[in-house]
Image (cartoon, rainbow, N blue to C red):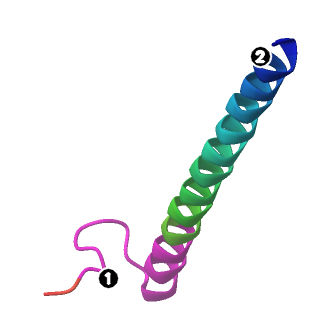
Amino acid sequence: MGIWLELGIFGLVFVFAFWQMHDVRKAQEKTRQQRMREQAQAATGQTGGEDPTELK
């Protein structure tokens, strides 16, 4: 009976780890896009206003 408890806890930890990895990937993508936006603004000399990556 105890092994099922241990396997259940292991399963929960495993699922939590994958959930955290998914969140990290989303944060990395968000940071990457923010850096691209900043580089585009620096390249065009913009200090604000319209987002050059936004589609019209």
Q: Residue 29: give its label.
A: none
Q: Is residue 41 above or below residue 11?
A: below
Secondary structure at numbered mark 1: loop
Q: Is the C terminus in the top left, top right, bottom left or bottom right quadrant?
A: bottom left
Crowding at dot 1, Cα within 10 Å, few <14 / some 14-19 / many 20+, comes out as few
Q: Is residue 9 above or below residue 49?
A: above
Q: Camera-side residue: 16 or 28?
A: 16
Residue drawn at (72%, 25%) of the image: 8
Secondary structure at numbered mark 2: helix
Crowding at dot 2, Cα within 10 Å, few <14 / some 14-19 / many 20+, comes out as few
Q: Is residue 26 above or below residue 17?
A: below
Image x and y of residue 14, in percent? 74, 39
Residue drawn at (37%, 76%) of the image: 46
Chain part drawn in magenta: 35-54
**In the image, 54: left or right of 29?**
left
Q: Amino acid at mark 1?
A: Pro
Q: Amino acid at mark 2?
A: Leu
- The residue under label 1 is 52
Image x and y of residue 35, in percent? 56, 69
Q: Are marks 2 and 1 in contact (CB under 8 Å)?
A: no
Structural distance between the alpha carbons of marks 2 and 1: 53 Å
Residue drawn at (22%, 73%) of the image: 50
Image x and y of residue 53, in percent? 34, 82
**Total labels drawn:** 2
User: Where on the picture, by quarter, is residue 5?
Assistant: top right
Of the two numbered discs 2 and 1 on the same chain, state the one appearing first in sequence: 2
- The residue under label 2 is 5
